[in-house]
Image (spheres, rainbow, N blue to C red):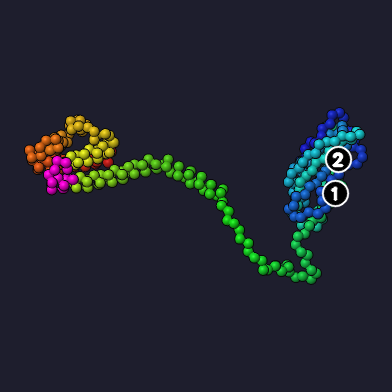
């Protein structure tokens, strides 16, 4: 409740020349307005003096802060002063304050000194009702609305953004792997449908034209699709290397040999029906690889 302002050395002496004095910085104050209260005490330099701190009872005022002023000693007297910042929310017309100063005279001897009560008058902002009035004064009318510039609520949106990022991060940590797998399956299925459509179109073109260039484009399409499906560089492998890569699969070996004879040899020496069968084998093998990877 009290804090030590001055602790002088030597024995404690008795104060001379009056006790503490407290006064307000002005004579009138409005409700909630800041008001300074100065408490001063002139005493013997050897005395140990304690002034009130923030825990003291300042009723009917509320404590809002304080400022310690340096001690001044002159002609064998020390002057200590503290300025308190107070506020009042009481509606009493006149309000008074007394806060004590303590003088320590020994381990078990404390002198409590009260200054004269300082008074302040309350400023009333509302008009005084005339005598005989039965109700509150009439409200003024005819005021114009003033437009207010909309203000962007930065703290609200920043808090919302931080919450959204935290929620998104948590959801990604819990479900991110599942979402990536689902997207990967969706992308793989879409590529497979596109491959089947392109392969069917090339097969139809070969049926109509019996062109070696169409066979070459179809085999290239097949290699590129398997490269993306297997995530490897299969389109640069030769027929022998492709056959070894797919564990010497008989359908792959027979189909690629048949298409190689068409592309690099003479189409007239190759049975067109055998080429059709080779293309069907390549398509069936691509569907088989798609099914295996999708299950895995």
Q: Which residue occupies 85% across, 36% down?
A: 72
Name the chief secondary structure element in magenta. helix
What residue do we see at 10% from left, 39% from top? 267
Residue at image mark 2: 41
Q: x and y percent of residue 97 in the render?
A: 81, 49
Quadrant for residue 282, please give it: top left
Q: Earlier in the sequence, mark 2 or mark 1?
A: 2
Provide residue 260's location: percent of width, then percent of height: 14, 35
Q: Which residues are magenta?
A: 202-214
For mark 2, give the secondary structure.
strand
Residue at image mark 1: 117
Q: Is residue 122 left or right of residue 211?
A: right
The residue located at (56%, 49%) in the rendering is: 154
Foreground residue, 195 or 72?
195
Q: Nearer the viewer, residue 236 or 294?
A: 236
Q: Where residue 45 sits: x, y (%)?
A: 87, 33
| Residue 209 is covered by the magenta coloring | yes
Disc 2 to disc 1, how far (Cα)?
14 Å
Q: Look at the image and say whether residue 207 sits in the magenta stretch.
A: yes
**Residue under the point 76% across and 42% down:** 66
Numbered disc total: 2
């Amino acid at each position: 409740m009290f804090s030590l302002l001055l602790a002088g050395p030597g024995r404690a002496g008795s104060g001379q020349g009056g006790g503490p004095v407290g006064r307000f910085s002005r004579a009138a104050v409005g409700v909630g307005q800041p008001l300074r209260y100065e408490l001063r005490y002139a005493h013997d330099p050897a005395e140990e003096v304690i002034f009130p701190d923030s825990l003291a009872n300042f009723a009917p005022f509320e404590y809002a802060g304080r400022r310690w002023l340096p001690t001044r000693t002159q002609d064998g007297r020390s002057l200590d002063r503290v300025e308190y910042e107070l506020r009042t929310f009481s509606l009493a017309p006149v309000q008074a304050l007394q806060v004590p100063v303590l003088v320590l005279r020994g381990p078990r001897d404390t002198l409590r000194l009260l200054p004269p009560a300082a008074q302040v008058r309350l400023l009333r902002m509302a008009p005084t009702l005339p005598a005989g009035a039965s109700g509150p004064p009439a409200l003024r009318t005819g005021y114009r609305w003033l437009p207010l510039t909309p203000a962007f609520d930065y703290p609200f949106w920043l808090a919302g953004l931080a919450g959204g990022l935290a929620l998104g991060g948590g959801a990604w940590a819990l479900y991110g792997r599942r979402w990536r797998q689902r997207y990967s399956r969706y992308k793989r299925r879409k590529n497979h449908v596109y491959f089947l459509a392109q392969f069917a179109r090339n097969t139809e073109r070969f049926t109509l034209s019996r062109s070696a260039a169409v066979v070459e484009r179809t085999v290239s399409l097949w290699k590129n699709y398997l490269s993306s499906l297997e995530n490897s560089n299969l389109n640069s492998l030769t027929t022998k290397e492709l056959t070894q890569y797919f564990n010497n699969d008989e359908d792959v070996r027979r189909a690629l040999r048949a298409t190689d004879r068409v592309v690099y040899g003479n189409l007239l020496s190759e049975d067109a029906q055998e080429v059709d069968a080779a293309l069907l084998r390549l398509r069936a093998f691509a569907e088989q690889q798609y099914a295996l990877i999708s299950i895995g």
